[in-house]
Image: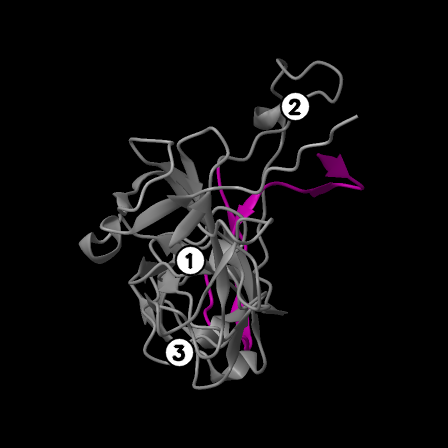
């Protein structure tokens, strides 16, 4: 473009690093004078170019970069604190910055907390909040220098279910005759629930309790003096002071596969008229 006899064109500037003032130079390259309406016409030969060196200054501003931090999954332990030794992964190259990257080595002791201390959904990833972003430790890769960036950290991680093994099933000793071979976890409880405490389970956190529910069957539905072995069809845990979703019920253990019940007669009331 030509304005008042001055030729304006694309130019190349000398790269200056860091956020300080540096001189730069305009380097004219492949200058052409063309018709503004019909660019195929080239009038370059009608002009004699005269270049005057000029000097100016500019400021390199820090580039804002958000670094996603992938925190290794952690088994539920009742707390929302990210342990200082928790592993974090290397970060991707920031958009628009060739061959530069950061590796986060630590989120800082007591500095990072999960969105919730519980398992989210089906062990979904949840947000992690940083109390002090400046406490995050990281190193640059391939020339990445923190002074060139405004860094924002976006850590995420998942809390996974804690394995829970049931060591004993209480309450399943007798069953009133009901015309079926079905046995519930607690035949004396209309809700069919049986509380599971730390003495009957391995894996519960602190003083948490969960309830065990489910059903099994015996071979003979009739009343008898002998105990019958229960064959379990379904067992599951449900909420109590602990949340069932925080635990993963492990395969049945042999020490409660041998639970047995005795079928007792039920009360029968006859009405005569």
Residue 200 percent coordinates (x, y): 35, 68
Q: Specify which label sits upstream in the sequence, 3 or 1.
A: 3
Residue 155 percent coordinates (x, y): 49, 64
Q: Specify which label sits upstream in the sequence, 2 or 1.
A: 2
**Callout 3: helix, strand or loop?**
loop
- Which image quarter is the N terminus in? top right
Q: Specify which label sits upstream in the sequence, 3 or 2.
A: 2
Q: Residue beneath label 1, please?
A: 247
Q: Residue beneath label 3, please?
A: 83
3D distance between C-alphas at marks 3 and 2:
66 Å
Report the residue at 44% width, 75% height from top.
Answer: 82
Q: Residue beneath label 2, please?
A: 34
Mark whose residue sits in front, 3 or 2:
3
Is 213 or 111 nearer to us in this picture? 213
- Which image quarter is the C terminus in? top right
Residue 69 lies in the magenta-colored region:
no
């Amino acid at each position: 473009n030509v304005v008042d006899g001055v030729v304006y064109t694309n130019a190349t500037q000398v790269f200056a690093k860091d956020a300080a003032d540096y001189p730069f130079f305009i380097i004219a390259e492949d200058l052409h004078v063309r018709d503004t309406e019909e660019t195929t016409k080239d009038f370059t030969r009608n002009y004699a170019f005269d270049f005057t060196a000029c000097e100016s200054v500019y400021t390199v501003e820090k580039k804002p970069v958000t670094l996603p931090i992938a925190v290794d999954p952690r088994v539920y332990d009742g707390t929302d604190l990210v342990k200082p030794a928790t592993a974090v992964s290397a970060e991707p190259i920031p958009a628009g910055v060739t061959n530069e990257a950061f590796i986060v080595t630590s989120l800082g002791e007591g500095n990072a907390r999960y969105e919730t201390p519980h398992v989210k959904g089906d062990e979904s990833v949840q947000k992690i909040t940083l109390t002090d972003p400046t406490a995050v430790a990281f190193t640059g890769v391939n020339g990445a220098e923190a002074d060139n960036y405004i860094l924002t950290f976006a850590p995420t991680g998942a809390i996974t279910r804690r394995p829970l093994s049931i060591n004993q099933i209480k309450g399943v000793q007798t069953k009133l005759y009901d015309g079926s071979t079905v046995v519930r976890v607690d035949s004396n409880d209309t809700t069919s629930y049986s509380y599971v405490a730390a003495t009957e389970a391995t894996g519960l956190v602190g003083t948490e309790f969960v309830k065990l529910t489910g059903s099994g069957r015996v071979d003979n539905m009739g009343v008898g003096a002998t105990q019958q072995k229960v064959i379990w069809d379904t067992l599951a845990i449900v909420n109590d002071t602990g949340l069932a979703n925080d635990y993963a019920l492990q395969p049945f253990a042999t020490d409660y596969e041998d639970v047995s019940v005795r079928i007792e007669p039920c009360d029968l009331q006859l009405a005569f008229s």
